[in-house]
Amino acid sequence: MHLRWCDSCGVPVVKLRECGTCGSGTRAVEYTPPGDVRPAFPVDVELFLELIGSSFGVSLCEPEKLGPVVLNSVPSADRMDEVIVNGVVVAAIRYDPEKGYSILPRPELALAIEPKRRWVIADQGAVGPIAGGANLLAPGVTSADPDIMPDDDVIILSDGKVLGVGRSRFSGEDLNRAQQDGLRGMAIKIRWKTEDREPMGTDNEATWEDAVAANIPHLEERLDKGMRFAVEVAERKGLPVAVSFSGGKDSLVTLDIVAQAGLDPTMMFLDTGLELPGTLEYVEKVAARYGLPLIVGNAYDAFWKALEHFGPPAKDFRWCCKTNKLGPTSLVIREHFPDGVLSFIGQRQYESQQRKSSGPVWRNPWVIGQTGASPIQGWTSFEVWLYIFWKDLPFNPWYEQGLDRIGCWLCPASDVAELERVKEVFPGFSRWSAHLTEYADEIGTSADWLENGLWRWRKRPGHVEEHGGLDIERYRERHGKGPYGPLPDLDRERYAGMLSMLGAVDPEETGLVLGYDGTEYHIRMTEGGIDIDPEPPGHVARDIGHLLLRSAYCVGCGVCVAACPSAALEKVENLMEIDSERCSQCGRCLDAPCPVIEYRPWSNVYR
């Protein structure tokens, strides 16, 4: 909650108590926590004005009369943004997967227009109660726009004055018959009353250039601190320096700070195989601008192949980050930085609790050989954008298409609103839609599992519990191999090679014999898993079980390959292969994280 406003200049200001342009005192903007705000691009402002027109039948003003508009993402079932104009929240724009976009006006907007639609006239007897905080009861309605539908947001008037804004429980036709039919009870749930409010201004000609100028003292301080951090970490770690460049705004600012600090980093970009069109060309353009070497890794079609093992990724089941990003990044680092690398990453603490807890310098167990550091760890999204405008940095043009984040185009962490936008402008999205449709038919899930984006969860949160969702038993039936049902026909030779990581392996008629920790274990493969004789201690059973799953379900992410100090492991297509003669049985590959183990419990393959 760092946003302030200079009323003299008509611009947003971050943290500064005095405007960097005119020196006037600034005021705190009241908006909904957590408050990681961002600038509204022309496409966002256009949507705001269009929704006013379609909902209330009026034209507010030309976009340039609103000055710099700011959006604040607030908790909701899907996307909902508060719209901040002249330092005041004037409305919220909400997306519903079933109904699309709608606008929830605040009093400042309602007072600035004369609605031709979605109006409700209250009688004089309701004026006092509404001013006192009461809802509008049905007997107090004298007339209403007949096109109002239940749950529409409406503007309540009396004698030409706006009393408040709220949500209608009834249709306009029902409200117009309220007196005749003797309708009782609450008709309009009042969200906001207009008492002591002023209409929003529509005469602010300030620009984003003006906003940047007002924030320069703060931005200079941020840049200086970021450069000092980058230099200090680089000197302390003594490793080659790189910037992990994703093509998004945060990595762009990180790159600029590190470059200005004089560290001459290598740019690393990992093509996940799910990048938005033009992203690679954009990355190459940025590398050329800075004159930096560029390393491009590629996950190719790893996602589509791993999809058969895991099923659709979800917010609470993000196996795809490991198979398509972190694992391949480990392989890139192993190839180009065998002794390790200090990688500056555009991570911010306001993005998630996990990123907040990691601190500004960290090690990710999924990315072998990398020390991560973020010079913008404490930055807000708004500071990032102001910095980009200040330095005139070439940001990814997809942000101007209405996207709030840049990354894999089908990421389950995205809102349905964002996914629908990608679907509109990217023909390649049809491949994912076709897969989800086929998958939904196969596991027998409900229609709105697909239509309402419920595939983005395995365990649905409360706000979508009323919708149908994933039938977990059918899911297990579909992905039931291993811990959820019969194992596939195992490649015994491949499993034997895997077990050689632990000790000497010999075949026998019914299975394999493993010499491990001075004991010979006879491993017999059964329909549902494996039997081990004699019964092993827990850590031995775990290692044998893990290797069984790895041999059956390896998707070739590359994490264990990068962890191997003797180069005994190699990624061949979408599988990890072992050279038993080179293996030193050090166990580092077993200690390395593995998506198969992370997302497929091993415990009941061994009985």
Image: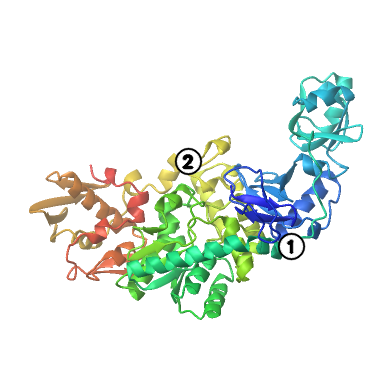
The residue lying toward the viewer, choosing from 565 and 299, is 565
Instruction: Residue type at mark 2: give it.
Output: Lys
Placement of 176 over or under 602, stated as above or below: above
Question: Which residue is more in the foreground, 38 or 86?
Answer: 86
SS class, disc 1: loop
What residue did someone put label 1 on? 207
* Sequence-first disc among 1 and 2: 1
Which residue does the image show at 83% across and 58% down from the upper left? 62
Give x and y (percent) for residue 347.
Answer: 48, 59
Residue placed most toward the observer, 65 or 140: 65
Residue ranking furthest to the left? 518
Q: Position of residue 168 (x, y in %)?
A: 77, 32
**Secondary element type, mark 2:** loop
Left or right of residue 393: residue 175:
right
| Crowd rating for badge 2 (residues with CA inside 10 Å; few <14, some 14–19, many 20+) | some
Q: Which residue is mark 2?
A: 459
Q: Amino acid at mark 1?
A: Thr
Which color scheme does this rendered protein use? rainbow
Left or right, residue 463 beside residue 355: right
Q: Is residue 410 left or right of residue 191?
A: left
Question: Is residue 247 among what the camera can see?
Answer: no
Q: State which quarter of the image contains the C terminus.
A: top left
Residue that protrudes farthest toward the front in the picture: 23
Q: Quadrant of residue 148?
A: top right
